[in-house]
């Protein structure tokens, strides 16, 4: 869900990977044989303790990959590409595509593309988890703070080198 994944991914980009999309893509995409079971608080390494506490409520859990899986015939598991059919069969509801300008959030139940959330957005920004809210025609659906205050701004973004997506995170045809 965006309200869980986006804060971790935004903070990871800004702090752990020091705004280096190539390093983040290498870690999240290229270095993982199969996929992710859970994104953990280790993605917040290097973030200010107050931000980590705000995002996690003081809890810590490790990221877990699916790389330890064993297939019924004993062959090594392989990464599958996500199509509409496999997304439905696997119960997948969300897709996240890393771009140099931000992270595209796709509600797989409604569209094949989605709005792009800027990497410079404050990771404390609360997001709507309703799939229909993530239309590719609208801005990312950030929720207003309960206290009526706006989130404090994140550090300024470094200029992007290009405006194309990372080659390993391409949109499906």
Image: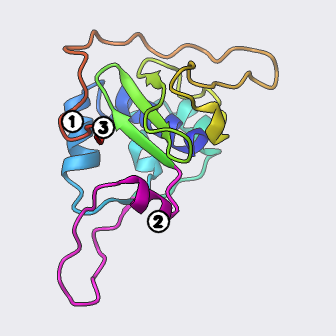
Nearer-the-camera pick, 9 or 98: 98
Q: Residue at x 34, y 19 (%)?
A: 101
Note whether residue 127 is visible: no
Residue 68 x/y as whole percent:
29, 74
Q: Which colour scheme is used?
A: rainbow
- Find residue 171 and name its label: 3
Left or right of 71, for residue 15: right
Q: Bin the neighbour count of mark 1 within 10 Å (Cα to Cα): few under 14, some 14-19, many 20 and up.
A: some
Q: Bin the neighbour count of mark 3 within 10 Å (Cα to Cα): few under 14, some 14-19, many 20 and up.
A: few
Of labels 3 and 2, earlier in sequence is 2
Residue 78 x/y as whole percent:
22, 68
Contact check, label 1 and label 2, Cβ < 8 Å: no
- Looking at the image, residue 131 lies above or below residue 117: below
The residue pinned by badge 2 equals: 90
- Find residue 23 and name its label: 1
Residue 66 x/y as whole percent:
34, 67
């Amino acid at each position: 869900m965006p309200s869980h994944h986006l804060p971790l991914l935004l903070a990871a980009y800004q702090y752990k990977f020091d705004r280096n999309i190539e390093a983040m893509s290498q870690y999240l995409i290229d270095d993982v044989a199969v996929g992710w079971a859970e994104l953990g608080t280790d993605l917040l390494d290097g973030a200010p303790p107050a931000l980590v506490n705000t995002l996690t409520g003081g809890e810590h859990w490790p990221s877990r990959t699916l790389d330890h899986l064993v297939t019924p015939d004993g062959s090594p598991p392989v990464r599958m590409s996500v199509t509409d059919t496999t997304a439905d069969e696997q119960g997948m509801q969300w897709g996240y595509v890393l771009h140099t300008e931000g992270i595209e959030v796709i509600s797989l139940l409604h569209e094949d593309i989605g709005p792009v959330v800027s990497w410079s957005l404050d990771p404390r920004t609360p997001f709507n988890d309703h799939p229909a809210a993530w239309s590719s025609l609208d801005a990312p659906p950030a929720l207003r703070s309960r206290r009526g205050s706006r989130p404090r701004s994140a550090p300024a973004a470094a200029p992007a080198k290009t405006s194309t997506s990372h080659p390993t995170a391409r949109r499906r045809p």
